[in-house]
């Protein structure tokens, strides 16, 4: 079973992709940047941008019938890897233990000049 997931509580896609796709029990969430879904503008400041990314992921998870704590893997893309520790600190506040698997990469640029993008995979029981 494959189902496209969409919610108005997360930014609409800015390209040719879905917000997320539910395939059996796995939820594949497209990379989220710190866009405010109401304005489709990037929030200012790295920490606020990162918090908004997690809000967006959470909203998509909720629409699919699960929560951000059902995420089993995050891929974090950063334009400045020196922000890695800030991501850790925010994740500690947003997520419950045990934490999911994660990879983090520094990239040269991200859409809309964002400084962080996170793609996710959740497992829906």
Image: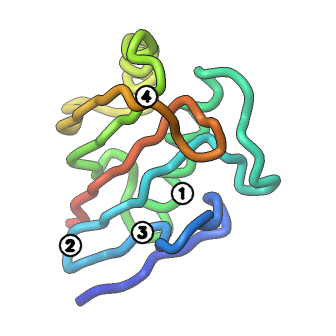
Task: Give the mark, 2 or 4, whose residue is nearer the N terminus.
Answer: 2
Mark 4 closeness class: few <14, some 14–19, many ≥20 residues within 10 Å = many
- Compared with 88, 49 (above or below) is below
Residue linked to disc 3: 20
Q: Which mark is residue 25?
A: 2
Task: Give the mark, 3 or 4, whose residue is nearer the N terminus.
Answer: 3
Mark 1 and mark 2: Cα distance apart in space: 17 Å
- Compared with 99, 9 (above or below) is below
The residue that appears at 22% across and 60% down in the rendered structure is 123
Task: Give the mark, 1 or 4, whose residue is nearer the N terminus.
Answer: 1
Front in this rendered view, residue 117 or 109: 109
SS at badge 1: helix
CB under 8 Å between discs 2 and 4 = no
Q: Which mark is residue 67?
A: none
Q: Is residue 110 left or right of residue 52?
A: left
- Compared with 45, 51 (above or below) is below
């Amino acid at each position: 079973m494959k189902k496209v997931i969409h919610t108005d509580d997360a930014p609409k896609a800015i390209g040719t992709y879905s917000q997320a796709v539910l395939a059996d029990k796995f939820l594949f969430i497209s990379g989220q940047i710190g866009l405010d879904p109401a304005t489709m503008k990037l929030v200012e400041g790295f920490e606020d941008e990162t918090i908004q990314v997690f809000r967006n992921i959470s909203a998509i998870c909720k629409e699919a019938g699960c929560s951000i704590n059902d995420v089993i893997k995050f891929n974090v893309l950063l334009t400045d890897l020196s922000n890695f520790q800030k991501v850790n600190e925010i994740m500690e506040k947003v997520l419950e233990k045990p934490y999911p698997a994660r990879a983090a990469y520094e990239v040269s640029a991200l859409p809309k000049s964002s400084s962080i993008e996170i793609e996710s995979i959740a497992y829906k029981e």
